[in-house]
């Protein structure tokens, strides 16, 4: 076949396989999904999946498709076996697609996820209202576009590792997420590391790894 | 002479003249200062002034030199005739040179200045402790390098205009202040506008204008 | 609901609420607008609103929609209670959408607005013809793309605060507004501060703040 | 004093305090160190510390100074109470200063550190020789300049979280670490997150957090 | 005619002519192809050829069109007269269009091509399984997007010249191929040189030249 | 010798030869100058010449050295045989080194030069005072750093060709002259073309060419 | 009206008026064109004009529309009253739209234009075949994308002023014309100045100015 | 020892070992050189070697040090066993340090090198005078800063592979070699590939590989 089926693509810590849908035809996605399902009972996560691909896969497989984040799941979510909770916080409502990609990735890898959305730093009281959630998290994923300041504020409040995801939300001098990216890399808070712009999957995966250490 | 003496260089609203010392020899600075002093009693502000230039000017004129911000003042500060107070807040101690340039500029233009230094967002409680000062300000100057998140947080807390100054403090992906600059331009808080990297003078001047509207 | 209704999003100084329409569905915009209207009599400003969203909102609410700037207003404009006039000047006719976003924002916040459009510096006499308006303004918003030189020239002429808005108008080495942005940040005129590329709302809001100090 | 002594600057999980030496005078560093030592028995870590500052602090305090990484430690290392081992791998010998900053940070925070230096991907057998170390790590810090490819290769081999640190090692199109930074952010391996260019401290801190989850 | 027919555009070493289809209308491509065919028996390679152009050319000439890489060939492939084999390796399946442009270019220039696709460094065993192919190549073309690390790893394994082609595959901080480009230019392996982003043709041509030295 | 003596390096239109001093040792500069003088009576212009090189050349040749612009001239200025006057205008006094490089280049090529220095757009009346000079110029060289707005204003006032020279004068977001460069390339005035940052020589040369058409 | 009719927009040296069509509706273009025609007999040049706008204007005015360069002309070309010939040379056939914008601009301003298209430096003999044309030109416009090397080679061959126009032709690391722009700004040939990417109008205008000095 | 002695660092095709001197202390360089010499008779090449390191190594070993290119060689050059000649061409005299690094690298790897220096494209006749050398080369290394146009012109003239080396020679918009780098990557000539800015070693090594295929 066109793509080498690779044992290493199986996500080791959870019980899931993952397909990166971008640049694959619906037909290719369907074939790889079926091949995975034939090999084992593991749930399959498909990211960056178009509605068109979702429709095709749905025809032959029981797909749960989240249109907002363009994420599909085939199979049962595994039981939640992480050490604690993963909190996912976003600056605005426009960051939700990335946040849901992160959340679904974390869930398919066996994590309990707490969603705290739309708590951007321009209204700091909104964030502070969730202090308890932040303090009891095992790991926090912070997702924000524009100036990405949320990562520093959360990093300063919390004592656990923070994974920051810059998003391409914004216009003008946000330069497709560059502003938030640089901001997060330069965070003055300790215990913050960064993944690629809009990479919700990467953040969810990393958070799960830390939650299963 | 080499530089056209310009009525418009007199800062109109206060009672001061200003010399931008960068790229001028100590001798040139001395000559322009003396020319200004001959013309009127107005105080003269000299920014980006080297120690060497300060030594030369001091020889013939009563100069107050602030070595940290490389700012010199000749003459009396005018009386404080602004509408209210200008608060100047910095993220870290490394931002102090820029902050003092802003503060001295504001003071020579007849403003009362409240300094709130080292209140970066990684320890948000430090900032919140000054809420009262922030709420009672007529205009706030926020000075920060690295991720520049302070501008958004202060902009969200306060109801008055915020002038944000990115600084070149940081290393690596701060790219000489670019990170803080983009961050501040993309602030999700309303009522924030931005001046050039390290431009303490510009911020102090703008703040004074607003405080004298 | 999906978006936290936030007291702090009410613009405090005027009597308006504001919705940032980008990235929101027409349905979401309609719901938030109605919720705001139920809570109070304040006018609601919707920026970055598509024609489609305008059509939907119009069905149930008395919307005034400005298609050029994609701005909608529901409710009465408040009375003009600012200290003076806000002048809005643009370099060319292509800057009008941004200018109208700024103007409508200022008006909904209770300001008298004077529009001086298409006075770019390549024909300096066109600008000089408005010297009187410029000199009598309380605050000026300068909106220009390409080389953004208008901000410096206006900043040099006027004695009041200037808020500069770079626009993405131009091609080639304008790099989506970067050229105008850098130009404005490096303005050799004092009393100029800058907001994000194409951010008419931010400029109108800041100008209103200054006009209500 | 000039810098607010801040409870939150005490690194909570270990038993250490940390001073960021860049932009501080030797005298300032000495004062803060002494203040920290007076408050408690915790070891103090000073990063970005010049030889000059080290000489001054040594005069009054028992400082261990690592000249390569410009890192100083005052006080006893705490006992190693992490869950497992932190592996620190570098691409070349020029990355050692950053690596030692990371290693000493991790050690002062109570971690056992395994150093694997000079295992760049151009000689992949050198890296593969350490497979066992990589597989038994709790968390891995990968430090590399130039093309930064080591992060992806290690990320692919190991099952634990990888913290990648781009370094400014290189010339020409490495653009001060930008090349390695972008490379690491775009890693095709899952479980890799990134800190700022040359930020050994940040990586060591994050790794310690994960090792103490 | 509009384009000067140029003896120098005939590719000297093989027996083929080449047309760069981008920015040419289907009609122009058809005319140039026919002119070339009238002049000689040489095969004609058309790169960046739209389906529409392929349809038009097919109507009057025996075109072999590869839709994936948008490459067309008219005429017989010449016999394989290179010194050895050209290996073409890709990091992922999304790099295939560029890889096929390179492969077809090499083949029309008289080379034997070995394709090794989807051997990205995040699963290094997949690449190592092809060690024999890599060691027996005369020249290797490495094609990868995202972090472009494959070039360094292959460059380290192999003893022959490596031509690296960054691709625009990726998102966010891949910045349209910039990440892979910088990565490849900074390769710590010797014997690696780089062509433009997505330039499969250039790499295939260069590889053929080396294989015919 | 190390550098090919090249008839084409003789500047054809005037009666001068030119040496680009950057990256040449004083000894090399002396040798090339002497070789030129042996070949003909033409004056020799040396740009980017260090004081050290000037001292060495002065020892054996009658050098006129302008320390501000680091320009040296050996031999007589030719008679002024251009069609009209070249006006050279600068935004500030810091642009003088570049302006003098341009002026001396123009003069050694047989042009009458009018210098209008320190007429930046923040005080537009200063520039307007020279309207007559600008209107009577054959060609104008505009030299400015920071926001580079002078080029557009002069271009709008004058009817002759304008050569714009961005300078690296400024700090922060001037990014070494990038701000002025982009600004000048995007000039909304017609009849403006641009040379490299700080390239006074190139502007003086181009202006002379136009003045001798 | 929405756009101030401006005497200065009349191109002084020729006998034409010019409208920049980008960002204007067909209706706006028609109105301005008619206003210009009512005021005088001068020909009107419309650049960046869509087919749609051309259709509308054609309905009421005798428009000559060049679809390749999206340029329209209403009225008679003036007689050719320049001092000599303007040569317009392009690197490839994809540069033709920009070249024709330049050529038509020059022609409407009263210049004789010689077109030398598709003479890129990769086949230097093609260019050298036109040496005579190049040597007899009064001014040369060089238009090239990709590496933009043509400007340097032509600048080295010719003795007259060269106006270089980078184009956005290319892909990958051409970054929308940035590559050619930087290349042309750094030309090692004297007598080359540069206009904005794709700015054929600006080059034609500048060339005409020089040809009418 | 601090650096793993690595069989793979032995350059396989020639009979030499290589040390990258940047970032190594003189003492480290001496130790590694001695270790290599103890292991075998192979010559050792040291690049980026300071005068200080050269002095130290000279004390104990017979070093040939080329100060211009900061390159040292210990041991005998091997016999010239390549297939043909390597031509190394530079645009200007400032490119010589990079050129000599390339030339010495090629020579220590057993190649005959022909140097053609200072043949930049602004005087194309200078280059054409060497047509014969160019046509008889097995591989050509083209080294140029500023606009880097030489690579395209040579690539168009020659039928053999061209390795292009951008240099950091230039100022202003050359941005440390970026201009030449982009130019070379976008070369419209086929058969050109590129190495890092100033990477003479990489080019000499690659050329040698091709000359020994
Ligand atoms: N055009 C605009 N650009 C940037 N920010 C805006 C714009 N329009 C509104 N806003 C901000 O967006 C907030 C409302 O956001 P939301 O709650 O997402 O609708 C307002 O309070 C403003 O601060
Ligand atoms: N090398 C470093 N790079 C970035 N941040 C650091 C570094 N070293 C220490 N820090 C941070 O700086 C804080 C101390 O800053 P300060 O109070 O200015 O000394 C620590 O808590 C860390 O968060
Ligand atoms: N995909 C490609 N990318 C870059 N250059 C190409 C490509 N395909 C062909 N070329 C070049 O374009 C030339 C033909 O250009 P043209 O005469 O415009 O068709 C060939 O000789 C190649 O040098
Ligand atoms: N300041 C300058 N900037 C750029 N190019 C210059 C400068 N001064 C002289 N040149 C060019 O350098 C050439 C002489 O170079 P060279 O033979 O290396 O001395 C002249 O003919 C000019 O084209
Ligand atoms: Mg924290
Ligand atoms: Mg606020
Ligand atoms: Mg002003
Ligand atoms: Mg892994
Ligand atoms: Mg190799
Ligand atoms: Mg003009
Ligand atoms: Mg010339
Ligand atoms: Mg060739």
Image: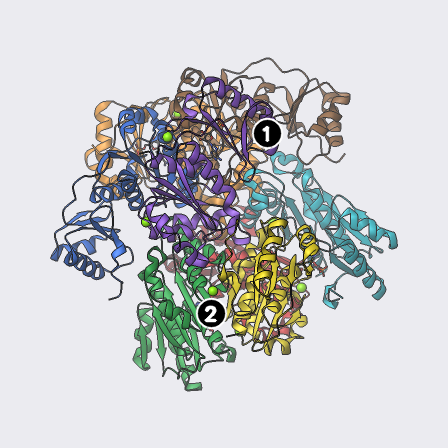
Chain colours: A red, B yellow, C green, D cyan, E orange, F purple, G blue, H brown
In the image shown, does A81 or C67 lie closer to the viewer? C67
What is the x, y in percent for residue B35? Answer: 58, 57
Tell me: is circle 1 under 8 Å from ligand 4: no
The residue marked by circle 1 belongs to what chain?
F
Tell me: is circle 2 under 8 Å from ligand 7: yes
Q: Residue pushed farthest top?
A: H79
In the image shown, does G59 or E22 lie closer to the viewer? G59
Q: Is residue B188 visible?
A: no
Q: Are marks 2 and 1 in contact (CB under 8 Å)?
A: no
Q: Work out whether disc 2 and disc 1 sit on a shared chain.
A: no
Q: Callout 2: few (<14), some (14-19), or many (20+) C-alpha neighbours within 10 Å? A: many
Q: Which residue is mark 1?
A: F53
The disc placed on residue H154 is none
What is the x, y in percent for residue H24? Answer: 70, 34
Quarter of the image where one finds residue H62:
top right
Total count of labels: 2
Mark 1 element type:
helix
Q: Callout 1: few (<14), some (14-19), or many (20+) C-alpha neighbours within 10 Å? A: many
Q: Which residue is mark 2?
A: C160
From the viewer's perspective, is residue F36 above or below residue C66?
A: above
In the image shown, does C208 or F65 lie closer to the viewer? F65
From the viewer's perspective, is residue D117 above or below residue D194?
A: above
Quarter of the image where one finds residue C116:
bottom left
What is the x, y in percent for residue B62? Answer: 69, 61
Q: Is residue A40 left or right of residue F83?
A: right
Mark 2 element type:
loop
The residue marked by circle 2 belongs to what chain?
C
Q: CA distance from mark 2 to mark 1?
A: 50 Å
What is the x, y in percent for residue C125? Answer: 33, 60
In the image shown, does A59 or B52 lie closer to the viewer? B52
Q: Is residue F129 visible?
A: yes
């Amino acid at each position: 076949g066109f793509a080498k089926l690779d044992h290493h693509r199986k996500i080791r810590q959870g019980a899931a396989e993952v397909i990166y849908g971008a640049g694959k035809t619906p037909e290719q996605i369907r074939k790889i999904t079926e091949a995975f399902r034939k090999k084992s009972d593991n749930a399959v996560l498909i990211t960056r999946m178009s509605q068109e691909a979702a429709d095709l896969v749905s025809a032959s497989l029981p797909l749960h498709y989240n249109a907002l984040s363009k994420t599909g799941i085939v199979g049962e979510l595994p039981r939640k076996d992480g050490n604690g909770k993963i909190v996912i916080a976003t600056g605005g409502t426009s960051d939700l697609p990335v946040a849901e990609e992160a959340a679904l990735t974390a869930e398919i890898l066996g994590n309990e996820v707490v969603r705290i959305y739309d708590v951007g730093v321009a209204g700091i009281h909104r964030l502070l209202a969730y202090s308890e959630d932040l303090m009891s998290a095992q790991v926090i994923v912070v997702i924000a576009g524009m100036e990405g300041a949320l990562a520093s504020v959360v990093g300063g409040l919390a004592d656990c590792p923070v994974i920051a995801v810059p998003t391409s939300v914004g216009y003008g001098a946000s330069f497709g997420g560059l502003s938030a990216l640089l901001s997060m890399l330069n965070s003055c808070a300790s215990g913050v590391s960064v993944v690629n712009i809009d990479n919700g999957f990467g953040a969810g995966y990393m958070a799960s790894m830390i939650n299963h250490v």
